[in-house]
Image (cartoon, rainbow, N blue to C red):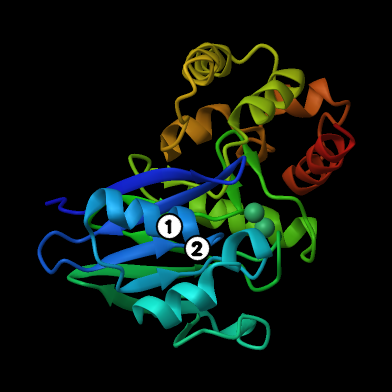
Amino acid sequence: MMSAQIYQFLIGSDNFGVLLHDPKTGATASIDAGEEAPILEALETTGWRLTDILVTHHHGDHIAGLAALRSKLGAQVVGAAADKHRIADIDLAVKEGDHFTMGSLEVRVFETPGHTVGHIAFHLQHEKLLFAGDTLFAMGCGRLFEGTPADMHQSLQKLAALPQDTALYCGHEYTLSNGRFALRVDPDNAALKQRMLEVEALRAQNRFTIPSTLSQELATNPFLRAADPAIARTIGLEGQTPLAVFTALRELKNKG
Ligand code: ZN
Ligand code: FE
């Protein structure tokens, strides 16, 4: 039985703000806290009271509003134990496989190194929700600032193994440019072509492309499809391992 409510908004030009609300208890979490003002505005709009902040990683565009919101509203900050040294405001430090509750909602932690070494994702099994931060994007994945391609490949595989009807919320509205890259490396993928038409229509109306579902990502996200022979062939790596293909895809994407 799903009961969580979500309010999604933009922070800056392309960071997603997300409020996760539990109507049973009134508890409300902000997923990351990139900036104070738009989060306060979202709380005002919804009438929800902030009780928790779930931090995916230490980058400024995800934590710049953290200290102010925590001290002003007294919210509990949940973040990676591995990042305690560089996220000053963590109250509850969590690791792979940890469970905690946000109101009456059960949240499970996945360690997803790659974008950063301490990156974590939050999964709500009963609600079928995944908050993947800058690990898994719609039709893309985060840049490798700290981790290795093998780290990121494994992190993505872990998230992709969750139930396919899980809704994916990610850290940025990068879907259109991700999709353009996906079409370059997977040009004959009919599901991808169809999805791009939908994404273009949404963006033309200035609407968000998020959430997607894991089943959509498995069908269209090249970074989850590194084992697909057609993609390997297109980038000249036929017969290579999925990790080799994934590594090459990430490098190609970096070059733009
Ligand atoms: Zn980041
Ligand atoms: Fe980010």
Can residue 5 be seen here? no
- Mark 1 residue type: Ile
Mark 1 secondary-structure assignment? helix
Pointer 2 local density, CA inside 10 Å: few below 14, some 14–19, many at least 20: some
Contact between labelled residues 1 and 2, with CB atoms less than 8 Å apart: yes
Residue 193 pos. (x, y %): 58, 12
Q: Work out whether 80 lies above or below 162.
A: below
Residue 36 numbered mark, or none: 2
The three-letter amino acid code for the residue at tag 2 is: Glu
Q: Which is more toward the observer, 191 or 244?
A: 191
Can you tell which quarter of the image residue 222 is in?
top right
- Residue 186 or residue 207, whichever sits in front: 207
Residue carrying label 1: 39
Q: Where is the C terminus found, in terms of image quarters?
A: top right
Q: How many marks?
A: 2
Residue nearest the viewer, comparing 133 with 12: 12
* Residue drawn at point x = 56 percent, y = 60 percent: 34
Can I make out residue 198 in this image?
yes
Residues packed near mark 1 inside 10 Å, few (<14), some (14 to 19) or many (20 plus): many
Residue 143 lies left or right of residue 188; in this view the side is right
Q: In the image, what residue occupies the spot 39% across and 44% down?
A: 8
Image location (x, y in percent) of residue 110: 49, 67
Q: For ligand 2, tell me if the residue under mark 2 lies within 8 Å.
A: no
Residue 192, by quadrant, is top right
Q: Residue at x 34, y 65 (%)?
A: 29
> Where residue 23 sits: x, y (%)?
13, 59
